Amino acid sequence: MSANGYETALRGITSVRGVRGAMVVAGADGLVVAESLMEGIKGAAVAALAASLATRLGRAMEAGGVGSDVFWHLQAERGALLVVPARSGMLIVAVAEPGVNAGLVRLELLKAAEGVA
């Protein structure tokens, strides 16, 4: 995918009210491939967290016999991390405020993941 393709995918995610940033992350090593983040968000740290959690959750879901992950939402006191894995192994990540419309963010993440696959 070209840089313009990543930019277009991230723009759709960041256009949702309450989203503070979006990234495309290499799932295998947690490196940021593309990002659109508000000031103050530590992209490298978020990317590493997303990749680590995706790896661990994937193993746990396989061991539990429930299949592979499609979407996950980690809610914290001051915000949320929403992630969709793409077929290519990339992770599409959104960093959001606590009251974000998670359903709308999920739709944009899934749309972006289709473009990255």
Image (cartoon, rainbow, N blue to C red):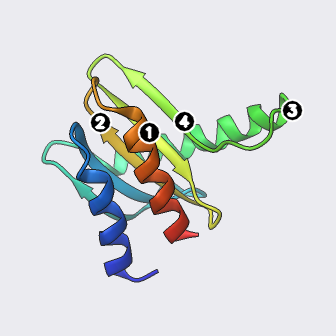
Q: Which residue is at 32% across, 61% downward?
A: 10
What separation in Å lies between label 2 and label 3 (alpha carbons)? 30 Å
Residue nearer the viewer, 62 or 53: 62
Query: What's the residue type where badge 4 is placed?
Result: Trp
In the displayed image of the protein, which residue is found farthest to the top? 77
Q: Are marks 1 and 4 in contact (CB under 8 Å)?
A: yes
100 left or right, relative to 40 = right
Of pointers 2 and 3, the one earlier in the residue sequence: 3
Q: What's the distance in space between the residues labelled 4 and 3, CA to CA?
A: 17 Å
User: Residue 2 appears at what percent x and percent y?
Assistant: 40, 83
Image marks 1 and 2: residues in contact by CB distance under 8 Å = yes
Q: Which residue is mark 3?
A: 65
Return the residue at label 1: 82
Where is residue 70 shown, x and y percent of the image?
A: 63, 44
Determine which residue is flagged by label 4: 72
Residue 59 horizontal side relative to residue 39, left or right: right
Q: CA distance from mark 1 to mark 3?
A: 23 Å
Residue found at x 41% / y 23% = 75
Could you say whether the residue bearing mark 3 is in a helix, strand or loop? loop
Q: Earlier in the sequence, mark 1 or mark 2?
A: 1
Is 18 above or below relative to 6? above
The residue at the point 21 percent across, 40 percent down is: 17
Which residue carries the number 2 mark? 96
